[in-house]
Image: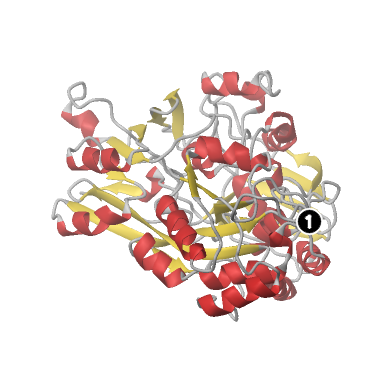
Amino acid sequence: MTTRRYCLSRLAVASWLAAAPAVVLGAAAQAQTLTVGVRAGPLSIDPHFTASAVSAEPLKHVFDTLVVSGNNLELQPGLAESWSAIDTTTWEFRLRRGVKFHDGSDFTAEDVKFSIERIPKVTGPNPATIYIRRVKEVVIVDPLTIRITTHGPAPTLPNDFVRLFVVSHDAARDFSTRETANDGFNSGRAAIGTGPYRFVSWTPKEQLVLQRFDGYWGGREPWQRVIRKELPNETTRVAQLKAGQVDIIARVPAADVPVLERDTRFAVVRTDSAYLFYLDFDFRTSTPSITARDGSPLKANPFLDLRVREAIDLAIDREAVAEIAMEGMGKPVTQLVTSQIFGYNRSLTATRPDVRRARALLAEAGYPNGFRAPLNFTSDGFPGDRGTGTSISQMLAAIGIDAPANAQPSAVWTPARSRGEFSFYQGVWGTLTGEANYTLSTLLHSYDPEKRLGTFNNRNFSNAELDKAIEAADVEMDEAKRRTLLEQAAAIAARERPSLPITGIVTAWAMRRDRVTITPRADEDTLAMNIRPVR
């Protein structure tokens, strides 16, 4: 067994700020107010309600985690100063001394235990239980030490805990059922954290307002007030930046990146994201929407045949998707994790398009005339999602597969996917814990509630060889051996093609050059701790 200890380092954590209308604020207030235009906002102020990134991002300003994910997804101390594996099934976390909640109460081990045990009671769609799936028991050793027993060896428990938000056990005690939780947090009564900003108000689909917490353990932030404006329409988001109504915008539309780069009033910062587009197939024997091209039923689900999946893989020109459909804001990928992730297999190469071979494979599989399989994807989830999905639909037509492009709002697409209504879809995924087993065990392992694996695999994919590699990596405490197992799992997935990674996402922020600067993050989070005023 390898024991790992991470020692205290100073973290600068920060938050979003956004301003009230300029006519109401004086010059001094405006100088300390940051206004951010983002594409989407939280689904709830309860940090345990969902694992969705759009909720986690803004809530990082109010609630801290035991372990923090750095700008390149590296692990850093948060509310835990250090952590170590003291045996194969026990982790000990030493907590930070002197931390205060926004109501002035002390942060202790009791709050950590409460938060871990609360998650299964309140989590909703896209369950946050994936971050505590390995936890068997939580023991308080003393007010600043907590010991966690796991279901078997859990080498990446600290990675999972980058999304373990800690709430006040006093403030949240009466708001810890599915019936009470959202009301308690959305009203602000339970929204008491230890983060750099206090919760002020939230208007769903409009804005989140935050106020600086001067008692923050990580030091005082430069921004006094935050308003995070939800601007899902890309044209509106850019227009508000140009009009000076926001200081910075996230996820700049690809077409606007070169325009804003040429405008001396603005600065644009790009970075390679941890997110990527991929295709998923339904592996159920009876799948809802696949037919022959004339609409008649097929004898079998064609996606169960590896030759069909390979044909679709060969039909896709990833370079063209990245350069044309994504307007240069994408990069071909080889696997479901990006290159900065632990366990990334560098020996894999992106599939090169070969339409002739793809047609031959379909014929060998018994589909010389192709078939019909609507391709479902979001129209407002990530920049480039509509263009990417539409482009892939057109490429599949070249090999005889009729894949009508079915773009839907995320609010419609996400629950439909969860209900298993799709046979074929384009998704977006980011390995936000920085470790490949998070993705492999969640998306590609057979659905197995007893082993707490395959949480998001609702399409009946199962491969014993891949399961074995994932399970071995899941418990391997030796870092080098675990890396090898993860690389092996990635190679099996590349061969079997249960999902097809398409392109990584290059993300961009644009800002008023005379107002702010930003340090970009691989997870695309737009955090006020990474945004600084221009002096």
- Give the quadrant of residue 309: bottom right
Mark 1 burial class by Cα count in 10 Å: few <14, some 14-19, many 20+: many
Give residue 345's position: percent from left, percent from top. Answer: 61, 75
State how many labels appear: 1
Residue 517 in view here: no
Q: Residue 482: give x, y in percent of width and height.
A: 73, 71
Which residue extends farthest bottom? 347
From the image, tell me which residue sits under label 1. Answer: 446
SS under mark 1 = loop
Residue found at x 55% / y 27%: 192
Vertical comparison of 400 with 40: above or below: below
Q: Residue 466 appears in which quarter of the rendering? A: bottom right
Residue 316 horizontal/vertical position (percent): 50, 68
Asked if one can make out residue 111 in the rendered structure from this viewpoint, the answer is: yes
Q: Of residues 299 and 169, which is closer to you in this image?
A: 299
Q: Is residue 294 left or right of residue 477?
A: left
Q: Amino acid at mark 1?
A: Ser
Viewer-proximal residue among 222 and 481: 481
Looking at the image, residue 475 lies above or below residue 116: below
Q: Where 387 sits versus 501, above or below? A: above
Residue most extreme to the left: 264
- How far from the left and from the top, in percent, is residue 251? 36, 49
Q: Nearer the viewer, residue 412 or 24?
A: 412
Render colour scheme = secondary structure
Viewport quadrant of the N terminus: bottom right
Residue placed most toward the observer, 98 or 58 = 58
